Amino acid sequence: MAGALLAPGIAARIGIGPTIIVGFAVSTLAQVPLLLAGPGLRWQIVLAATSAGQLFWATVSGTSRRSLRQAVCGPSFQGRMQSAGTTLTAGVRPLAAATAGGLVLALAVRATLAIGALLQVVPLVLLLTSPIRTLRKIPTRAAVPPAREGASS
């Protein structure tokens, strides 16, 4: 809840693009303690703190991403845009879980976690090399070229 409440202020201060990128970067970096963790209370505290930070920034980033998409997407596309995003993110979860389970059986838990951590670098690199890194404010719909119904790409 704190991330959702603070997201507009953070985005106003550092920019909408950097806010989104920080969320992805924190999520990627939060995998390091998970890979290093061992038994004991100290690691439980480290993992709990890391998870809290990761969830905070995931919420800040997610709120900022949805706000950006809604601002640049015409009203007639809002429902389709949200449905497509939800379907893609939620729809891949069972496949990801099955793949992770297979990797654990074939490799080991830590190796599977390492592969997952490495895969989280991909969207971060894509964002860092995209124009979003310089986006400071959410553009107004007038500044975005209109989408054409049925346009081919």
Image (spheres, rainbow, N blue to C red):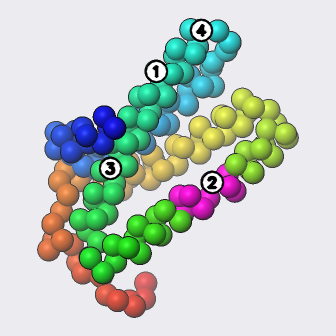
Q: What are the residue bounds of the magenta stretch?
A: 88-96
Q: Amino acid at mark 2?
A: Arg
Q: Earlier in the sequence, mark 4 or mark 2?
A: 4
Q: Earlier in the sequence, mark 1 or mark 2?
A: 1
Q: Amino acid at mark 4?
A: Leu
99 shown above or below 28 = below
Q: Quadrant of the N terminus?
A: top left
- x and y percentages locating residue 104 in the rendered image: 79, 38
Q: Amino acid at mark 1?
A: Ala
Q: Residue at x 44, y 33 (%)?
A: 54
Q: Residues within 10 Å of mark 4 (few under 14, many from 20)?
A: few
Q: Is residue 39 magenta?
A: no
Q: Would you name the residue on which mark 1 appears?
A: 49
User: How far is mark 1 from mark 3, CA to CA?
Assistant: 21 Å
Q: Is residue 92 magenta?
A: yes
Q: Would you name the residue on which mark 2 appears?
A: 93
Q: Residue at x 23, y 65 (%)?
A: 71
Foreground of the two, 140 or 77: 77
Secondary structure type for disc 2: helix
Q: Earlier in the sequence, mark 2 or mark 3?
A: 3
- x and y percentages locating residue 122 in the rendered image: 52, 49
User: How far is mark 1 from mark 4, CA to CA?
Assistant: 12 Å
User: How far is mark 2 from mark 3, CA to CA?
Assistant: 20 Å
Please indicate whether residue 62 sits to the left or right of residue 40 in the image. Answer: left
Please indicate whether residue 140 sits to the left or right of residue 88 in the image. Answer: left
Q: Residues within 10 Å of mark 3 (few under 14, many from 20)?
A: many
Q: Would you name the residue on which mark 4 appears?
A: 41
Instruction: In the rendered structure, find residue 63 and report the number of the disc placed on it.
Output: 3
26 shown above or below 77 = above
